[in-house]
Amino acid sequence: MLILKEGGRTEIVIKRSRFIADLMSVDTQEGARELLRSLKEQWALLGINHLVHAFIVGPGANIMGCSDDGEPSGTAGRPVLEVLKGTGMTNVMLTVARYFGGIKLGTGGLVKAYTESAQSVVALAKTAELVPMVSFSISCQYPYYERIKLILAAQDATIDGEDFGTEVTIKATSKKAVFDEIALQCRDISRGQARVVVSD
């Protein structure tokens, strides 16, 4: 599964209609809808009536959505979504704004135009592998604090915060694949006293 590191914008012209495609990152379905609302307001000021979109979110790319936004049913949002599905990306949204050039394209022409527009912007995408992460906390007595920090550093975990009370609590994030090893090592060096709890 891939995530978008760098999106972009392309423009193609078909029979005087301009199709402007943008590819961008989103984290959630709600985030995609909020961004779309904002973009529609911006494009409306420029006289754009059709802002077709498609998005895919979720760690398994299992949440998808699209809209023809006033274009004939099935001619815009679905073709854009199909292009997006073919990328293997998640947490991504693709929009296509259309300036009508005065010549009707017909349903087949619209499908072709929106597909080509989506393909052109996807070709610019810079992606990276999606690495599942886990956030957790480790509570331990002070004598184990420095050694636990070394364990976290060795596994490339990020320390997100520390709380110094009657004991130390370290909040951290690591790759999911190494979490069990971190937890095991922390319990081993503290003789089972360290408590490792996955955050919600």
Image (cartoon, rainbow, N blue to C red):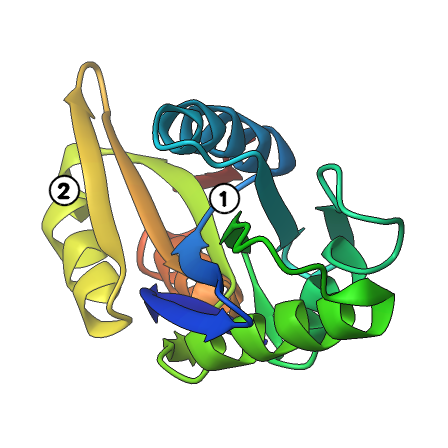
- Name the image quarter holding residue 129: bottom left
Count of labels in the image? 2
Task: Using the image as rendered, state which of residue 6 and residue 141 is in the foreground.
Answer: 6
Q: Residue at x 41, y 58 (%)?
A: 22
Task: Using the image as rendered, state which of residue 177 and residue 31 is in the foreground.
Answer: 31
Q: Quadrant for the N terminus, please.
A: bottom right
Any part of residue 129 in sight: no
Image coordinates of residue 56 in percent, x first then y, are 65, 56
Dot 1, how many residues are within 10 Å of its Cα: few (below 14), some (14-19), or many (20+)? some
Identify the amino acid type marked 1.
Answer: Asp
Image coordinates of residue 62 in percent, x first then y, are 77, 57
Image coordinates of residue 92 in percent, x first then y, are 52, 57
Q: Residue furthest right?
A: 73
Instruction: Give the labeled residue for mark 2.
Output: 143
Instruction: Give the labeled residue for mark 1.
Output: 27
Secondary structure at badge 1 equals: loop
Dot 2, how many residues are within 10 Å of its Cα: few (below 14), some (14-19), or many (20+)? few
- Name the image quarter holding residue 89: bottom right
Residue 160: numbered disc: none
Image coordinates of residue 102 in percent, x first then y, are 58, 53
Q: Residue at x 72, y 66 (%)?
A: 105
Q: Residue at x 57, y 34 (%)?
A: 49
Taking 45 as reference, is 178 left or right?
Answer: right
